[in-house]
Image (spheres, rainbow, N blue to C red):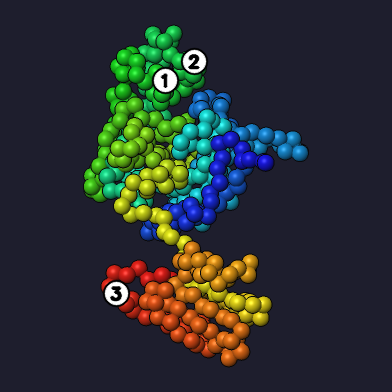
Amino acid sequence: MITKPKGTYDILPDESNKWHRLEEVIRKVCSLYNYMEIRTPIFESSEVFHRDVNDTSDMVTKETYDFKDRSDRGLTLRPEGTAGVARSFVENKLYVNYPVSKLFYMGPMFRYERPQKGRNRQFNQFGVEALGSNSPLIDVEVISLGAMVIRALGLNDVKVKINSLGDEESRNNYKKVLVDYFSQYKDCLCPDCQNRLIKNPLRILDCKVDRDQEFFKKAPKINEYLNETSKQRFKEVLDGLDSLDLKYEIDDNLVRGLDYYSHTVFELEVNIPEFGAQNVIGAGGRYDKLISDLGGPETPGVGMAFGIERLLLASDYSAKKLARPHEIHAYIIALGDKAQKEAIKIMNVCRIGGLSCDMDYLKGSLKSQFKKADNNNARFTLILGDNELENFKINIKDNLTDEQETISLYDVYPYIINKLNAKSPCAGCNVKGE
């Protein structure tokens, strides 16, 4: 038996309806904010992700799936969505027709890491990117969009963790201070951080290994080295969050896992006790050099990404469940070959008109076919046998009201449509088929 690769999983039919519902929520929220969908290739030229020898993020240095194609071109399965969107923005010159491009994406990403709950080698992300504006208010908008997606899932206790990395001048000043400070403790740093100390000391602040050491907690904070321009910009972002009543906490050690970020960086947390310390389900920040790094014009940008699997896990703890039982409008029990041939024609008319329907192709017993109708949560069950066929009639049962009738074969579609459009027989009933 051939099995799936380690770190991947199958989304089975019983689970896929949750994915569809989540995607509907995401698309609806993005529409409210006027973000348009973009779809980029699953693999890109390796240069899209491996641009800078100083990039010390684990994703770039350890976790990408890199390979050569038959023409010896270096390709990489996308480990995240932002770089591919930026490449497309430059290549397709979106900046010409869309000076401010507000985009969102959904799809699979790939990172070679140890699989664990909620973290796989193939995983899915939803993300947004706003390209072309340096306004602090568009940072606020992106954060607000993320919070609205979470709240739309019924998770209202949302908190923003936020920090500013400042502009290039601020970061360069801070990096010098960090190098001086951590050099005193170089032998106490993990091997990765010893490397980061040389290439990008800011990344030390994101270390999961050293963060509990006492000297780490006493490291200089970046807010002490922001210049006045960066301080004012950060204040405007915080003022915007205040105006929207979004709860936030300034986290001096917060940096993002990729090295192209500047100014605003943030994480979105939900208060789910079962998640423990792993309550971050979305994160993002501003990147003002990425587009030019990929050969485009100087273009500011800000973005955010969610792990879709994390969103699905979080939604399980919400009163507003994503999962809905599978339902169809009609199930036809056709008894005999002639009846089955007629049932195919009836279903075709119904499907053209937008009704979902099915029948048994295994020619099972009457009892087994009734069971299949129940398993499909059919709103209507139709029975067609030789006698009914001879009289060009069909028996139909409304499984919501238990009403049964015999109608003409010509009337199946209009009969079901009229029933579906009729007012629910009881207030608050969830009528199948709506």
Q: Type of residue at label 1?
A: Val
Q: Secondary structure at mark 3?
A: loop
The residue closer to the viewer here, 374 or 304, is 374
Task: State left or right for residue 156 relative to residue 202.
Answer: left
How many residues crowd mark 3 within 10 Å: few (<14), some (14–19), many (20+)? few
Q: Which residue lies under the disc numbered 3?
A: 426
Q: Quadrant of residue 64?
A: top right
- Residue occupying the point 59% across, 76% down: 334
Q: Residue furthest bottom?
A: 391
State whether residue 427 is above or below residue 81. Answer: below
Q: Which residue lies under the disc numbered 2?
A: 191
User: Does the image show residue 233?
Assistant: no
The residue closer to the viewer here, 316 or 49, is 316
Q: Where residue 278 sits: x, y (%)?
A: 37, 34
Q: Quadrant of residue 309?
A: top left
Q: Nearer the viewer, mark 3 or mark 1?
A: 3
Q: Which residue lies under the disc numbered 1?
A: 209
Quarter of the figure with the N terminus: top right
Q: Secondary structure at mark 2?
A: helix
Q: Nearer the viewer, mark 2 or mark 3?
A: 3
Q: Where residue 361 sits: x, y (%)?
A: 63, 68
